Amino acid sequence: SFCIHQIKATKSLNAFITVAEKEAEDLAIQSDVRIKNGSTRGLLDGLPVAFKDNFNTKGTRTSCGSQMLANYYPPYNATVVQKLLNEGAIMMGKTNMDEFAMGSGTVDSIYGPTKSPWRSGLRYKLWHRNKHRHQASSIMEKEQFSTFTDKDWFIAGGSSGGSAVAVAVGSCFAALGSDTGGSTRNPAARCGIVGLKPTYGLLSRYGLIPLVNSLDVPGILTKTVDDASLLLNVLAGHDPKDSTTVLDPFCPVKISEEPNISGVHVAMPEEYYCPGMSSEVVETWKEIADLLERGGAKVTNVSMPHTQYSISCYSVLNCCEVASNFARYDGIEYGHRATNESSTESLYAATRHEGFNEVVRGRILAGNYFLLKRNYDKYFQKALKVRRLISNDFLGVFEKGVNVILTPVTLTDSPPYSLWKLKDSRQQSSIEDYCTQPANMAGVPAVSFPCKLSSQQLPISLQLMAPCFHEQTLLTVAKWIE
Ligand code: GLN
């Protein structure tokens, strides 16, 4: 009931598309009874969770923030959703997102933008280095919520902005997001929480409505690294319904209360410094590197020369897979159907025009252009080769004995909505992913975690990346910093 109170108190932040209030209350009562009787259902019994609206939830609308699926009620649960429910977690609702997860702000949803709970001058509590983490669970004072009538506000980041806000304000214990180029890590960073993108293939994508199949992973948003590990342990593992999940048994992550980082090799790639990065972000990056060094880690500078090509490479690959994936939304089988039935072609055209926003339509068009026979080698094939070079940068660094790579997540702290909207949102959105996209290209795990407050009193986070399936090291170092 505390979470339901929080959902209501923060309604103006627009974190949820659908709230499952009644169902959640009933389930919470049942779980209370079970816990009293000493017969818990699972590891997460009674814990409130939320799902980004691109995870299929049986009988609960799954819209992807789009008109195309505004009335879509899936007949099955995504595997990751089912795994959480099997452990007794309670679904509080479905969270807001950029249409079909295309964006970095949660400003492009048919349900309107999601707002960051952080406001200039109103300091949201940030927890430092293991102290009072749980007490300072970032719940804002009641009267602070009631003043959210401002015309301007800071963006929540995206595309999983609804999930990040829901966790930040305490509307749920944890939430699932998706991460194709940074969509879990970016909003987590902007909202001052932990955002984990696991290794590609460790968590099932079955029932996650695809954006880019070769890059998508379900992401985990929580307040602490320990909470992220708990969820990871529940969610990881092979799924016969997703052939890209690995067969090897998953060794659960165990992080000690007093993590030790002595001897851990941390690398700082110089190419992650990008024009437009604020001095505060760069300072935070250096400060945390110094902190790690003082804690006994070995910190070195490395070069990852292909980082700069990541944005263009991602744009081509993203559009190509989108062009192919989105052919299914034709207005015939499911989803929105226009009324123009003068011919099959005009039905398709009207359906897609009405169902998708400009960003989605733009990517479908660009993708079909890149995939034309005459362009295929020039764009798609070339992008695949560049992707390999970006992956090789990671392999090269890890082969030298590096355990984790430390970088910024975003270039600056959260911009106000008015400023964000002034810029071309598509261009803005891709620059925002400069530090996050390479991990998707290489499939490696990455986590973003809050480090300090900017001069505007907004969170600044950093990112750690590790070799594939090294979540244990990744989260240990993140917890040490936390
Ligand atoms: N901003 C990127 C995009 O628009 C990444 C989105 C994501 O990770 N889902 O594609």
Image (cartoon, grey):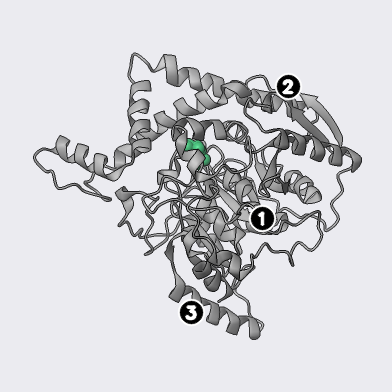
Residue 66 coordinates in the image, percent (x, y): 35, 49
Judge from the rendering whether residue 327 lies leftward or rightward of residue 341; answer left or right. Answer: right
- Quarter of the picture holding the N terminus: bottom right
Can I make out residue 307 in this image? yes
Residue at horizontal 63 percent and vertical 76 percent from the top: 40
Question: Which numbered tag is attached to residue 26?
Answer: 3
Question: Which numbered tag is attached to residue 228?
Answer: 1
* Residue type at the position of mark 3: Asp
Q: Report the front residue among 260 and 354.
A: 354
- CA gap between label 3 and label 2 equals 54 Å
Above or below residue 235? Residue 106 is: above
**What residue sits right under mark 2 in the picture?**
303
Q: Earlier in the sequence, mark 3 or mark 1?
A: 3
* Residue type at the position of mark 1: Ala
Local packing at callout 1 (Cα closer than 10 Å; few below 14, some 14-19, many 20+) is many
Residue at horizontal 52 percent and vertical 36 percent from the top: 215
